Image: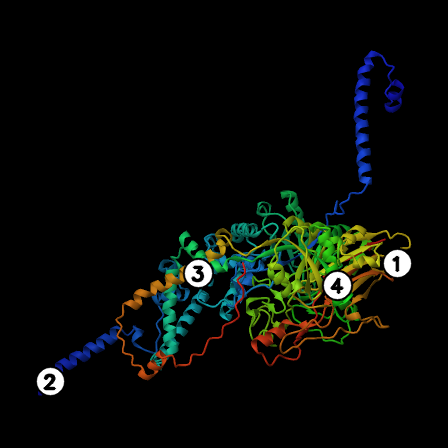
């Protein structure tokens, strides 16, 4: 016995009495240790015998949730100026599927409710227009407030979208922003508005049924360079409720226009409250090259610290919205026949003529504006700095200033109340915002250029703030230009072709690889990345044309490259020698604004392996799913209002699409 | 001269003198001159108040004092413009027999009255309840079903074979009493969902088609009895429907916010109409309307042709 004990525990038994106590303790420890070992042994042996239930440990998202992360209401100074008088309450009701009365007097309703909404009113003087209208006592305490209130008073009795109202409100707007830098005018009032905003979000947040996030927009832009300002706007989204979010004030461009200052504020928020927050930039297409510039706000080359900070606070990018689609540009991707989609070249519309060649400087600017080129740039920085500043997932949203998150093609309510549905909206001469747009003297933006786009799709476990926010942080999201296709995109080393046919495709996807927004590293010897992709049409929408995988990589010479693969084609088509596929055709009847699902497939699935893989090269892959052609919102307008003379340059047909977050490969 | 002693002449001269004296003393009173617009403080105050629909003399007074010179000039210009056009319109007798002017005047009055009545609106709990009762049919939660299904694709097998496969599988499913959670092991992948939990008719119809949706909502729920095959545009389905919830009225608390908005609007309207009533009732009405006796007779005999109104399709009330 003693021997056994000794050998087991190394506790010597032949000791003097003084040490007996030690031995006893030792024995106790040994006994505890032994039982622990037995327990571990038993449990591992149970685990070694797999559970009968295939769902043990299966914690993965099974549902895709639809929402808008970027909506403005009457609380935004510019939305109010444009005629929006609908409050957040109406915006929430509309998003939840109820009928509301739009600013133009028509009743409006979504076809299907959204699952979540972020009302992101501009932080700058948030709610001030309404405060002036209702003669809020806090505002009337200052001379500036009194003056502006008086000016506001002259608008009572006028229509909100009347041009006289607009001019008057523009004057007030100027005054607001002039006095905005003075805390005595804004601070107390903003605090009261922010409290009300957070309370409204909490009130409309119904975990499991509808998620209302607290948020706002930081409306920064760069100083004019080459005569043009660059858009640097970000939407800030809090995971938390009012208890934490109302401990801080919205960070506006009056505090700073430098994104690094915004990120410092976000870090401060998390430190102070223990909450979580993120920022989503948008409209790189009108940023004059600044959104994904190789230099920071101060003009210095990006550093590793910048890259780490940016990718930490900005996991997503709003790639498509009413002010154009920022995925790809036809000049940067000349072989991509789908790249010229709702392309806006600047605040000043489509002023770049086709067929024109670019110089290097112009090319560099453009590369800082589009998602695909930015992702490629990010690979370059990854190689140089060891961190990737442009490692973002993708979502879509509206940026509507109408309080209505309405971008279904046949139910498009425009960017501003003045572009609510009306007979002249599709016509050439109507401007997007107002006639004339004071401050944009050469405004070329025509209302027909608005894109009826987009929504954010989020793969999450449940419809709650925590689950959706976590999904956004891990980038398991995708963007669509309006329709609700379901898209699954997994990357791994072991997918087999049969996996595409499995009923539990997603389970296999998670088990053998990683979902969209994730990383693959260290390719196993002799293996190439394989991607399991499944796309299903919007049940109320059009069939699918094709699935494409877009690959970007950093080649041996330090140059970035891109390649588009048609990985699944509907109607049994195949690629030709030139790697192009014949078009799917079109069933669109423009005069009647209808289409049929006689072409295309309702569902496409594929497992695809990268034929050009090099395990030593940094790369990313993302999926683009295209629908068959359908009528554009301009065709629905022309049909409904009986417009006969729509100019030739107005597109009437669109091919809606989804863009997934990329999967990155690192050697 | 005899004429100078005429009393009538004296009166004439006195009258003329009075006239000239009056004119001289009131030479500043430009109101008498139709081509002069006098702008004074009172006029500006009324102008501002009518335009802003807020009749607060004290506040308007304050605001007037705080205007900058430029703003004051602008205000005066606007007033002058309005006054000039108004006088011109009157000179052209546009206000006589002009129906538009008439409507405009009425609108102005209504505007003013609304300003008064809006300020006083409140509504009670009782009104909320009454609205709820009256509009019960609008506050309706759609029926919901919970089911899982086993699918055989038309694309893959062809319609006939898919149906045959489905029928055979149905027998097996019922024999083995396959439960809800075991269903994923059977059939093929369906492009939308495997399980549908508490789904409403519209969503089920958009995935499976109207015919199958109607059949499902008529099915009796059961924990172990499979039914089918049901046909959708994609193929054939065997369904295990475990729950079926009928449509029901939404309780008051759930729709309170919506009701309060509607009641508020209705209360404002009725308050407004109430405020107009005393104005209308102050007038005595004499009716002297002659009608074509023959036409009246014809209508009463139902001979007259009524064009029926176009009834738009009625969308089923959704909750």
Residues at marks 4 and 1 on the same chain: no
Q: Position of residue A488 (x, y in %)?
A: 74, 58
> What separation in Å lies between label 2 and label 1 (alpha carbons)?
128 Å
- Label 2 close to label 1 by CB (< 8 Å): no
> What separation in Å lies between label 3 and label 4 (alpha carbons)?
59 Å
Q: Position of residue B311 (x, y in %)?
A: 49, 72
Q: Which mark is residue B265?
A: 3
* Mark closer to the observer (4, 1): 4
Left or right for B10, reference A265: left
* Mark closer to the observer (2, 1): 1
Q: Is there any visible trace of residue A222 in the rendered image?
A: no
The chain holding disc 1 is A
> What separation in Å lies between label 2 and label 4 (alpha carbons)?
131 Å
Labels 3 and 2: the sequence-earlier one? 2
Q: Which mark is residue A614?
A: 1
The chain holding disc 4 is B
Q: Secondary structure at mark 3?
A: helix
* Disc 4 target residue: B164
Q: Secondary structure at mark 2?
A: helix
Labels 2 and 4: the sequence-earlier one? 2
């Amino acid at each position: 016995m003693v021997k056994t004990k000794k050998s087991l525990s190394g506790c010597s038994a032949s000791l003097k009495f003084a040490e007996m106590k030690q031995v006893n303790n030792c024995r106790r420890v040994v006994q505890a240790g032994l039982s622990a070992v037995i327990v571990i042994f038993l449990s591992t042996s149970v685990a070694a015998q797999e559970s009968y239930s295939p769902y043990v440990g299966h914690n993965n998202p099974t549902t895709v949730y639809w929402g808008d992360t970027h909506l403005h209401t009457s609380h935004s100074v510019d939305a109010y100026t444009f005629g929006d008088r609908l409050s957040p309450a109406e915006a929430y009701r509309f998003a939840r599927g109820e009928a509301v009365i739009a600013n133009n007097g028509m009743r409006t309703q979504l076809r299907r409710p959204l699952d979540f909404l972020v009302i992101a009113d501009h932080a700058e003087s948030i709610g001030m227009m309404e405060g002036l209208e209702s003669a809020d006592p806090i505002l009337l305490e200052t001379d500036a407030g009194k003056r502006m209130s008086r000016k506001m008073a002259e608008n009572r009795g006028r229509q909100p979208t009347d041009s006289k109202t607009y001019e008057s409100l523009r004057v007030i707007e100027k005054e607001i922003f002039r006095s905005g830098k003075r805390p005595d005018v804004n601070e107390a009032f903003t605090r009261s508005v922010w409290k009300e905003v957070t309370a409204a979000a909490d009130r409309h947040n119904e975990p499991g049924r509808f998620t209302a996030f607290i948020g706002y927009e930081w409306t920064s832009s760069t100083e004019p360079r080459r005569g043009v300002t660059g858009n640097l706007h970000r939407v800030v989204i809090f995971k938390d409720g009012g208890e934490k979010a109302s401990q801080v004030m919205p960070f506006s461009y009056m505090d700073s226009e430098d994104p690094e200052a915004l990120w410092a504020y976000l870090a401060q928020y998390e430190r102070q409250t223990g909450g979580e927050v993120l920022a989503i930039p948008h409209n790189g297409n009108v940023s004059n090259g600044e959104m994904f510039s190789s230099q920071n706000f101060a003009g210095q080359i990006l550093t590793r610290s910048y890259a780490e900070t940016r990718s930490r606070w900005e996991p997503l990018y709003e790639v498509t919205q009413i002010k154009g689609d920022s995925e790809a540009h036809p000049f940067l991707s000349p072989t991509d026949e789908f790249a010229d989609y709702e392309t806006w070249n600047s605040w000043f519309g489509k002023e770049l003529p086709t067929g024109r060649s670019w110089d290097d400087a112009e090319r560099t600017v453009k590369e800082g504006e589009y998602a695909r080129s930015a992702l490629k740039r990010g690979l370059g920085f990854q190689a140089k700095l060891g961190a990737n500043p442009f490692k973002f997932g993708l979502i879509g949203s509206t940026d509507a200033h109408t309080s209505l998150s309405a971008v279904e093609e046949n139910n498009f309510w425009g960017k501003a109340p003045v572009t609510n549905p009306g007979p002249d909206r599709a016509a050439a001469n109507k401007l997007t915002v107002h006639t004339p747009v004071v401050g944009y003297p050469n405004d070329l933006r025509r209302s027909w250029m608005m894109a009826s786009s987009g929504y954010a799709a989020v793969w999450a476990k449940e419809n709650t703030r925590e689950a959706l926010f976590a999904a956004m942080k891990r980038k398991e999201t995708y963007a669509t230009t309006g329709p609700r296709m379901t898209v699954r995109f997994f990357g791994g080393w072991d997918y087999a072709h049969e996996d595409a046919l499995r009923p539990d495709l997603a389970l296999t996807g998670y088990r053998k690889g990683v979902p969209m927004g994730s990383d693959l590293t260290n390719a196993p010897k002799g293996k190439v990345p394989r991607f399991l992709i499944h796309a299903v049409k919007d049940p109320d929408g059009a069939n699918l044309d094709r699935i494409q995988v877009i690959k970007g990589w950093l080649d041996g010479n330090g140059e970035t490259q891109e390649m588009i693969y048609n990985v699944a084609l509907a109607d049994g088509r195949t690629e030709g020698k030139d790697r192009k596929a014949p078009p799917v055709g079109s069933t669109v009847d423009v005069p009647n604004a209808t289409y049929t699902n006689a072409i295309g497939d309702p569902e496409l699935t594929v497992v695809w392996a990268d034929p050009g893989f090099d395990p030593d090269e940094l790369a990313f892959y993302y999926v683009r799913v295209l629908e068959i052609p359908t009528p554009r919102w301009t065709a629905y307008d022309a049909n409904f209002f009986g417009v006969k003379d729509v100019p030739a340059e107005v597109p009437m047909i669109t091919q809606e699409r989804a863009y997934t977050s990329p999967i990155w490969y690192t050697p | 001269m005899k004429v100078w002693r005429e009393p009538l002449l004296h009166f004439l001269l006195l009258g003329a003198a009075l006239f000239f004296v009056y004119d001289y003393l009131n030479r500043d009173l430009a109101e008498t001159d139709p081509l002069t617009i006098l702008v004074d403080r009172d006029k500006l105050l009324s102008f501002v108040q009518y335009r802003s629909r807020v009749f607060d003399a004290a506040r308007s007074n304050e605001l007037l004092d705080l205007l900058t010179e430029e703003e004051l000039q602008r205000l005066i210009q606007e007033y002058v413009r309005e006054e000039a056009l108004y006088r011109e319109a009157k000179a052209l007798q546009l206000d006589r027999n002009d129906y538009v002017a008439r409507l405009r005047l009425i609108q102005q009055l209504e505007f003013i009255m609304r300003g008064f009545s809006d300020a006083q609106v409140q509504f009670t709990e009782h009104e909320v309840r009454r609205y709820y009762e009256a509009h019960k049919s609008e506050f309706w939660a759609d029926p919901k079903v919970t089911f899982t299904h086993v699918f055989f694709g038309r694309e893959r097998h062809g319609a006939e074979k898919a149906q045959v496969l489905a029928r055979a599988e149905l027998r097996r499913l019922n024999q083995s009493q396959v439960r809800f959670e075991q269903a994923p092991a059977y059939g093929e992948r369906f492009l939308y969902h495997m399980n549908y939990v508490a789904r409403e008719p519209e969503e089920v119809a958009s995935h499976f088609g109207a015919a199958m949706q109607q059949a499902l909502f008529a099915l009796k729920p059961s924990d172990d009895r499979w039914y089918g095959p049901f046909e959708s545009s994609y193929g054939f389905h065997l369904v295990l429907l475990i729950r079926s919830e009928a449509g029901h009225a939404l309780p008051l608390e759930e729709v309170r916010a919506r009701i309060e908005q509607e009641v508020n609007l209705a209360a404002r309207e009725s308050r407004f109409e109430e405020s107009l009533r005393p104005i209308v009732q102050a007038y005595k009405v004499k009716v002297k309307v002659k009608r074509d006796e023959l036409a009246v007779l014809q209508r009463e005999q139902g001979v007259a042709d009524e064009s029926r109104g176009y009834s738009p399709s009625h969308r089923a009330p959704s909750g």
